[in-house]
Image (cartoon, helix red, strand yellow):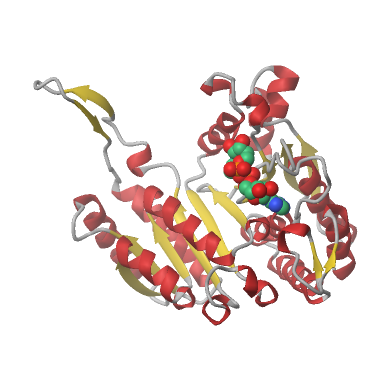
Amino acid sequence: MSKRILVLPGDGIGPEIVAEAVKVLDRLAGEGLAVELDEGLVGGAAYDAVGSPLPEATVAMAKEADAVLLGAVGGPKWEPLDIALRPEKGLLGLRAELGLFSNLRPAILYPQLADASSLRAEIVAGLDLMIVRELTGGIYFGQPRGVRTLDSGERQGFNTLVYAEHEIERIVRSACEIAMKRGRRLCSVDKANVLECTELWREVATRVVAHEYPEIELSHMYVDNAAMQLVKWPKQFDVMVTTNMFGDILSDAAAMLTGSIGMLPSASLNEQGQGMYEPIHGSAPDIAGKGVANPLATILSVAMMLRYSLDEPAMADRIEAAVNSVLDQELRTPDIMSEGMTEVDCMGMGDAVVAAL
Ligand code: NAD
């Protein structure tokens, strides 16, 4: 039976980069990958067409799909809108509707691009780590929250860090499943020396790994040390798992180690293994419509989709090898251009990946 993929190009450079990723999917479909693509509206494009950043039809199609491929949403055109109608609401709404609790953020630095990092090449060349961030719980969602006025008349802001055992168990399991497909090393990041909530996190992580994944080598690290280790020697890590807020911060730091935002894919999964796949970057309004965006992050998101939602790891490997090959051919979009390389545009890069496949 064919797998259904919902394609949501979104705003800005979204349609340009998604078109190149769809070329890659079409190529694989021509070789026997059984997929059916539907296209839907999200973000500012959806607001312009039907007055909502997340139309009901899009939610319904997303729930029916095995996976969602998203470009990006947002842009200055929609900034004056009320917050409930902004494009970003479309993205947050999809995460909530699909129950996407596990956010996979790889930080991969192709050796060919090592000069793009702000760190020395030998520290980052060949970096390949995966941060698994809990996405639907923790302090970003905990109740009570707000700003209250104390008896003294002074205002006080407050948020609550909460994790129930089942939330910790499922994110640790999700990270273990990823680790089993990689180097079988998992580092759980917490602040167990100060926060009771993450003391429980550490206890549950230890239990899940010991009982269910004895093959995995588990270590624990306090978040402040993890931040230091990421910039000191990032290649020590295979898979990291952490809370929503710690993951938000650490995954951005890890992404920036690679120096090339146009190269990094991401995935968000729910308990059924259904996932939404998207580049980590935004809609890049400054270059939208110029045809110069780097489509590789979106193409690599398709590779993640094949690996984590469509159970086609060999095809995923082939896409990643094709990306390696175009970099070896010294083809570069402007964002990763350096001296002596050949500059190509968005379509040129997509065509080169298809040719390398
Ligand atoms: P951005 O990631 O869109 O752009 C940051 C810089 O990186 C820009 O200079 C841009 O040109 C460049 N860049 C990004 N992707 C690129 C690519 N594929 N190829 C070449 N260059 C690329 O971040 P921003 O400027 O802070 O945000 C722009 C809009 O995107 C905002 O409306 C923001 O809310 C939205 N946004 C959306 C998402 C998402 O859809 N997941 C994520 C982040 C930001």
Is the C terminus in the top left, top right, bottom left or bottom right quadrant? bottom right
- Residue 142 lies, with reference to residue 171, above or below; the image says above
- Residue 2 lies, with reference to residue 51, above or below; the image says below
Comparing 243 with 78, the one in front is: 78
Residue depicted at x 34% and y 44%: 138
- Residue 318 lies, with reference to residue 98, above or below; the image says below
The spot of residue 117 in percent (x, y) is 58, 68
Comparing 241 with 165, the one in front is: 241
Residue depicted at x 43% and y 65%: 240
Quarter of image, res 306: bottom right
Is residue 210 in view from this perspective?
Answer: no
The spot of residue 316 in percent (x, y) is 71, 65
The spot of residue 52 in percent (x, y) is 64, 21
The spot of residue 244 in percent (x, y) is 40, 48
Give the number of callouts. 0
- On the rendered structure, is 246 left or right of 274? left
- Residue 47 lies, with reference to residue 33, above or below; the image says above
- On the rendered structure, is 34 left or right of 204? right
Residue depicted at x 18% and y 56%: 194
Quarter of image, res 262: bottom right
Single out the residue that lies furthest toward the front: 339
Is residue 218 in view from this perspective?
Answer: yes
Q: Quarter containing ligand 1?
A: top right
Single out the residue that lies furthest toward the left: 152
Single out the residue that lies furthest toward the bottom: 122
Residue depicted at x 22% and y 23%: 148
